[in-house]
Each structure stands twice: as structure tokens, then as C-alpha cells.
Image (cartoon, grey):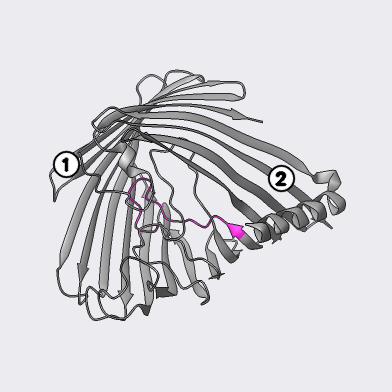
């Protein structure tokens, strides 16, 4: 933590001294309460503050240099089993610098990397943990370097290298070895009225310090990820994402994931938007085999009454366990304030988004109230 704070202070000082004329400061302050009345009762209250410092410096006419520094600081109080647990943390949220031209950008540091067309159940959630139920869409970043090159026909190439990341990302069950580099890339080209892309990522896994130590063979092994995705827009938006994760172990070495989705906006009032996705996971020893499967369906609806009020909802259905998950969100926007009232009604055991950390609060039924101040 001291080292992270030291880096923050150094980068902040350099930004102010060298780029004062383009220096900007903003921030977000959410406050919330989540109540789950099912026995044993759970009540969580919290406050978070994310200050963001950014700068931008044009270099001649075709080049620019910019950066961002933000901190995720929060404190929560959880009442559970007649006791109160306090959790507080201060850690870097984003620390990156970027060099850009008209067709090229190179970004280095703690950053968010995400891609793909799926919006709810995302097989390509490789480097983030964005929760579609979260109105703020917060996610931790990864340390690395990302380069993008854009061709004149809208095709583009991504290349990345990561290092020092040992926390679970996306759908991961095993953390990466933070001392070994991860690397990969993505090629995206125009495809009819949309685009099609192929992606690859390589990493070394180290589960020696996890609860999975000693299970499924060796504790350190490599993993290669391959993906194909496309999206086209005709009468409806239609997309496909498919991934294969191949690990060099003897048991459950292959994970296959397929997502098919669509979206459409009905001409009702200001516009009723619907998004629906189906995802299937399969764990097996070989690509040609069928093993342990999990299938989920999700549909989200969004309707804005006006520029101030809107309502949205998400339904999930677990085909294996025959479980239905329900989320409903009313939101209001007034100048710099956003207000949310969220209700949920779920099974007693939460089977989706297991890596997000607070899913036990959303078992059973309950509600959440949130106020967010933006400056």
C-alpha cells in the first residue's frame, strides 16, 4: 500500500508540474445501503470515493500524450449474525499514461481492458469484472501495456502484455502468477454491417496459495485462451462469442464457452430497449468431449420516462438448477446527483458471478438504495 501511494504522489506531481494547463480533476462519491431480510439478516452500508486526476498534452498536430490517476477508497459496515464487520480499503484504481496518433495508441499502467459484443453474460470478460447489475459499472484494472492500431477501413489490431496481476479476473477460478508475464492480442475486421474478431491470451497459473492447492494435479501450469466473436446490425443487433480455454493439466483441461445474443429497441414511448443472451459453459478433458455444463439465459429491459427517470430490469435463468434471478432498478438524475432504488429476488444459493465478492448479499430477496454525487 505504501508503494502504491508513493507512485500516486509521484505521478500526480509530474502531472501538475508538466501539464498544468490541461490538468483536470473530477470524482465520484457513492453512498449505499443493502438490506437482505432473510434470516440471518444482512445489512450493509458503505461509502466510496474515487477521485480522478487526468491530463492531456498535444504534441504538434498529430500526436498527444495523456494520462489518468484515480484511487478507489471505501469503507463498509456489514451487520450479520448479530455482529458488525468493518471493511476499509485504499488502493489505486487507474494509473496509466498514453501516447496517441491518428491511428495508433499505446497505453501503459493500471488500466481497464475489455472488448467483445456481449453485454450481460460475457465469455470475453477476460480482464475485468464488470457486473451488469451495477449502475456504476465499476471494475478493477490490470497492470500492463496495451497497443492498438486502427486501419483506414475500420479494422484494428490489439496487442497487450500484463505483469504483476494475481487477483481473479472475469470468470477465472485460478489466479495468474504475478511474476510471469501474460500476453495476447486481438484482430478485428469489418464484417457485413458489423465486425468479426479473433483473440488470444497466454498466462501462467499459480494456485499454490489458494484453496485449490493440491487439487487437479500440479499447482503451476499454463493456459491459452482462443476466441472468435462477431456482431452484425440489421433489423436487430445480433452477436456471437465463443472461447476455448486450454490448460496443460490432466483433469478438466478444456473450458468451452458460447454466447449468442441480440438487442432491439421497440418504438414505445421514448424507446423500450431489450437485450437477451444465452451462454453455455462446458468443462471437459478434450475439445471433442462433453463434460460438466452450465447454461444461463439473461434478458434485460430498459425504459427512460424522460431525461430524469428510468427503469431497468434483468432476469437470469439457470437451466441446470432451474433457478430464476430477478433485479429491478429505478433511477433518478438531478444535476450532479444520481439516485438508485434496486430490488432483487433470487435463489438461496447464488450460482452466477461467483468472483465478484459480495454475491451472498444478493441471495434470497432484498433491496439496495444508492446515492451518487459526481463532480
| Residue 198 figure quarter | bottom left
- Judge whether residue 272 can be spotted in this image: no
> Alpha carbon of mark 2 to alpha carbon of mark 1: how far?
43 Å
Q: Quadrant of residue 125?
A: bottom left
Q: Is residue 83 magenta?
A: no
Residue positioned 57% across, 63% down in the render: 143
Q: Is residue 269 visible?
A: yes
Using a 10 Å C-alpha cutoff, classify the residue at mark 1 as few (fewer than 14 neighbours), some (14 to 19) or many (20 or more).
some
Q: Position of residue 17 (x, y in %)?
A: 87, 52
Q: Which mark sits nearer the N-terminus, 2 or 1?
A: 2
Disc 2 target residue:
53
Q: Which numbered marker is on residue 186?
A: none
The single residue placed furthest to the front in the displayed view is 82
Q: Position of residue 359 (x, y in %)?
A: 33, 43
**Tag 2's secondary structure?**
strand
Quarter of the N terminus within the rendering: bottom right
Left-right relation of 176 to 288: right
* Residue 370 placement, left or right of 238: right
Would residue 322 be found to the left or right of residue 174 on screen?
left
Local crowd at mark 2 within 10 Å, few (<14), some, or many (≥20)?
many
Name the foreground residue: 152 vs 197.
Answer: 197
Badge 1 element: strand
Considering the whole magenta stretch, tell me its main secondary structure: loop
Query: Which segment did they paint magenta?
Result: 110-124
Viewer-nearest residue: 209 or 125: 209
Where does residue 64 sit, x and y in percent of width and height?
A: 76, 56
Residues 268 and 9: in front is 9
Residue in view at x 52 percent, y 76 percent: 181
Q: Give the numbered dot on residue 323.
A: 1
Where is 245 relative to 70, above or below?
A: below
- Residue 58 shown left or right of residue 37 in the figure: right
Q: Residue at x 32, y 72 (%)?
A: 213
Amino acid at each position: 500500500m505504501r508503494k502504491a501511494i508513493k507512485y500516486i504522489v509521484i505521478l500526480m506531481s509530474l502531472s501538475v508540474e508538466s501539464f498544468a494547463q490541461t490538468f483536470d480533476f473530477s470524482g465520484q462519491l457513492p453512498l449505499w445501503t443493502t438490506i437482505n431480510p432473510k434470516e440471518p439478516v444482512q445489512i450493509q452500508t458503505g461509502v466510496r470515493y474515487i477521485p480522478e486526476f487526468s491530463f492531456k498534452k498535444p504534441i504538434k498536430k498529430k500526436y498527444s500524450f495523456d494520462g489518468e490517476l484515480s484511487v478507489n477508497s471505501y469503507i463498509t459496515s456489514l451487520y450479520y449474525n448479530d455482529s458488525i464487520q468493518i471493511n476499509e480499503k485504499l488502493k489505486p484504481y487507474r494509473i496509466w499514461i498514453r501516447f496517441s496518433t491518428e491511428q495508433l495508441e499505446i497505453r501503459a499502467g493500471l488500466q481497464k481492458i475489455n472488448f467483445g459484443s456481449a453485454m450481460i453474460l460475457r465469455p470475453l470478460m477476460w480482464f475485468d469484472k464488470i457486473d451488469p447489475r451495477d449502475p456504476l459499472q465499476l471494475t478493477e484494472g490490470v497492470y500492463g501495456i496495451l497497443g492498438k492500431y486502427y486501419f483506414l477501413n475500420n479494422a484494428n489490431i490489439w496487442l497487450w502484455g500484463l505483469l504483476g496481476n494475481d487477483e481473479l479476473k472475469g470468470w477465472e477460478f485460478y489466479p495468474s502468477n504475478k511474476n510471469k508475464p501474460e500476453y495476447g492480442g486481438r484482430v478485428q475486421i469489418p464484417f457485413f454491417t458489423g465486425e468479426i474478431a479473433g483473440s488470444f491470451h497466454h498466462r501462467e497459473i499459480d494456485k499454490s496459495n489458494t484453496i485449490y492447492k493440491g487439487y487437479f494435479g500440479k499447482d503451476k501450469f499454463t493456459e491459452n485462451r482462443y476466441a472468435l466473436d462477431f456482431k452484425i446490425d440489421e433489423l436487430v443487433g445480433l452477436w456471437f462469442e465463443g472461447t476455448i480455454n486450454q490448460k496443460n493439466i490432466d483433469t478438466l483441461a478444456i473450458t468451452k464457452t458460447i454466447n449468442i445474443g441480440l438487442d432491439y429497441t421497440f418504438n414505445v414511448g421514448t424507446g423500450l430497449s431489450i437485450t437477451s443472451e444465452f451462454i453455455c459453459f462446458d468443462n471437459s478433458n478434450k475439445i471433442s468431449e462433453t463434460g460438466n455444463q452450465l447454461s444461463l439465459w439473461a434478458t434485460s429491459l430498459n425504459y427512460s420516462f424522460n431525461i430524469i427517470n428510468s427503469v431497468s430490469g434483468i432476469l437470469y435463468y439457470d437451466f441446470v438448477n432451474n433457478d430464476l434471478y430477478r433485479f429491478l432498478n429505478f433511477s433518478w438524475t438531478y444535476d450532479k446527483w444520481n439516485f438508485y432504488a434496486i430490488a432483487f429476488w433470487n435463489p438461496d444459493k447464488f450460482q452466477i458471478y461467483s468472483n465478484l465478492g459480495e454475491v451472498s448479499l444478493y441471495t434470497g430477496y432484498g433491496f439496495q438504495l444508492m446515492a451518487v454525487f459526481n463532480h
